Amino acid sequence: MKTLIIAEKPDMGRTIAAVLEPKAQNKRTYLEGEHHIITWAIGHLVSLAEPDRYDEKYKRWNAADLPIIPERFKLWPNPRTTDQLKTIGELAKRCNKLVNACDAGREGQLIFHLIKQYLKLSQPVDRLWISDLTPETIRKGFDGLRSDAEYDSLTRAARARSEADWLVGMNASRAFTIKHKTLLSVGRVQTPVLALLYDRHKEITAFNSETYFIVQALFTQSDFSYKGIWQGDRIIEKEKADALAAKVKGKPGRIVSYEKTESKEYPFRLYDLTLLQREANGRFGYPAKKTLDIAQALYEKHKVITYPRTSSNYVTEENIPVMGNVLNMLKQTSAYGQLANGADRSRVHKGNKAVCNPAKVEDHHAILPTPKRPGTLSTEEQNIYDMIVRRFLSHYYPPARYNHHEVITEVEGEQFRTKAKEQLEPGWRVVLGNENGETPKAKSRKKKGDEQQEEQDDELMVTDRPFSVNPEEAVRCKDASGIEKATQPPKPYTEGTLLKAMESAGKSIEDDELREAMKQTGLGTPATRAATIERLKQVGYIQTAGKRLDITTKGCAAIELIRGAGVELLASPEMTGRWEQRLHQISRGEASDEQFMQKVKQFAEMIVGKVKQQPQAQASIFGEDEGKGGGPGKGRSGARGSKSGKSSGSSAASGSSRAPRAARSTAAGEAASGTGAAKSRSRASTAVAVRDSKPSGAPEWIADCPRPGCGGKLIEGKRGYGCIRYKEGCSFVIWKDQQGKAVTAAMAKSLASTGQTRKMTIKRSDGSSVSGKLVLTDPSAGTVEFRE
């Protein structure tokens, strides 16, 4: 008999087949060779069942039925991919051995084992654990297959994560929604992230800016000039600043102290996913999910980078020779040939702990280029690939060298300080190219909002020209003036800075070593953080304004209600960070998953009990008029959700109405993961969108609802086109905003009726255009994709 290999996605399966069975027959949903059959999961084919699969009564959201704590969790197939699940079951009957070739990580382990459990597969299982999809790595991986039983601890951690998210999300979302008669999505990870945005919003709105003045003087000595900042108590009167400037202007002075020290700046750490997402957001404005999607394409489709969903910034000794092969490949390219030829291969070795540190490599090493030469990449793919290649090359170059100068100049008894950072050798910074080649200001180790730091930033002069003063010679104050300044509030979060906060469980940690130690106590994982941010957007809790992330009125209300109910722990980043740490310990066999789950069940019970005692909130706190006249998603779900929630939520509380299936998906959203699950989570606010679509008169039907067996009609709402039978459980909705393209009623009708739109042109963020169609890929939910 043959061996059945189950990959996570089709591209991965086909790549593996090309290496193991190059003559395999393509059967569309699998490939069959002489010794192996290779198929794929397409993300999550199986997930935890929703409550109504345990008991029909749970279709009605009733406070008396909470908490819902199954004795044994049931599984349910994804209705979109039942055919593929059936295919795997049929293929397994023809094989006497299985290979788990899903992504090498916690979620890949979960995807495979849920399939295995649901289909009751009993064959022995081996585990393929690889970090890139080059032929050499695939062959090496299959030569070194290990028993899947060796990964039992990781499997237990994956199940615990999924079940814990189900318990908290399902019970908390139902409890708050029933009590306050508005759809409120609550989750173990998403709620603490929302709390970070809420707390920052409050800091900004409560901030009172204060005006102050600095006195800046220009000094000359021979043919050299430099600036200095007056040292003394903060000046708040303009007259005092002007008087001080007049006092020293044109007067002779002397240098009372001069210190010069040399420093070296080493290359920045290799990329993990979160760091890549942060920097791509800062440089190109890419949302975290977009960067992940691009990186995944570079890994799966182009095979030019290693596995991107990693939390490590280091490599192991085994990676060093492969890195040498990558360097050889880059020497042959026009874009990087000159830099690669100038690289010093001896700098990257197993003794270089800034690169090779096996103790800090968990499931996967840092993101690296592979030895495969890139073909044609899109502009966005090239941008991300370029970042990864340049970061890789930088470690083959020497450190940048600087002289730091600090001068204290005295004039008329007043002292002025000058700080200068002079670049002596650019070192590795030559690799950065024009985009980022300038010498940055020294990073501050002080907390945000520190007023002294604001003044210190004014002092630092960064230069690549010689800085030369003679402390023995006199100086002259050529000019001086008072400059008005104002204290600045904390900056709003961008996706980049929010990812950084999630990584450290909300702690503003500038120290690299301390932040490294906090990695296993962060919010979510590198693979799930982007989906969490997207989910907050979809349920109307946050919205984007350029790069900035703004919390909506509904988002603020959700946090205030959660904290007001006495379940502050649910919104605590550090608590959720500690949960992630415990899951990590379970994955390493250092903690019990049973004990962890027992505490989660107690936590879910406590949440429900607290919410039941909470007074019902006024509908107005959810922002009924928020975002009027705005574009899609600009806070409208929060506004409209409260209106319709008044009737829907009331009946849910009394047990007389079915809650929308989309709301149930919202509650369970944290229990799923992966590409397919992220799409299902994005439907979390379907109920809100459909409620939004009901005008006072009879609604105008767009088309028949294409959801199998529904029989309902589609009507237009503010943010999408939803089914009128949402109360009966239909979660179908086509969002108006698709790939930056506004979906009209005519387009929605075409999608619902024929499954696609006419050909259109979509403009990418880089300014280029691409032609294609919007295609309805999931008639049961309304998932739409753009296909060229």
Image (cartoon, rainbow, N blue to C red):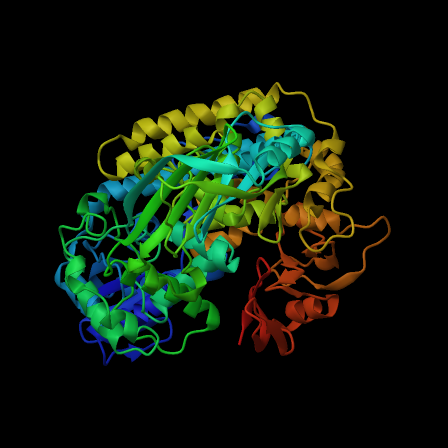
Residue 162 located left or right of residue 558: left
Residue at 61% in and 72% down: 762
Residue 396 drawn above or below residue 21: above
Residue 199 position within the rendered picture, expressed as x and y whole percent measured from the top left: 57, 32
Give the percent coordinates (x, y) of residue 314: 25, 50
Q: Residue 523, position in %: x, y?
A: 42, 38
Q: List the single residue furthest toward the right.
A: 697
Q: Residue at x 82, y 50 (%)?
A: 695
Name the side, left or right, on which 728 lies relative to 454.
right
**Along the horizontal axis of the image, is 510 left or right of 770?**
left
Residue 418 image point, x, y percent: 44, 40
What residue is drawn where x is 42% and y is 60%?
436
Q: Quadrant of the N terminus?
A: bottom left
The image quadrant of residue 588 is top left
Please tell me how many numbered marks the rendered image carries.
0
Residue 549 shown left or right of residue 390 in the figure: right
Q: Look at the image and tell me whether residue 538 can be seen.
A: yes
Instruction: Inspect this view and state whether residue 489 appears.
Output: no
Q: Nearer the viewer, residue 706 or 617?
A: 617
From the viewer's perspective, is residue 766 above or below residue 535?
Answer: below
Q: Who's the residue at 66% across and 38% down the image?
A: 554
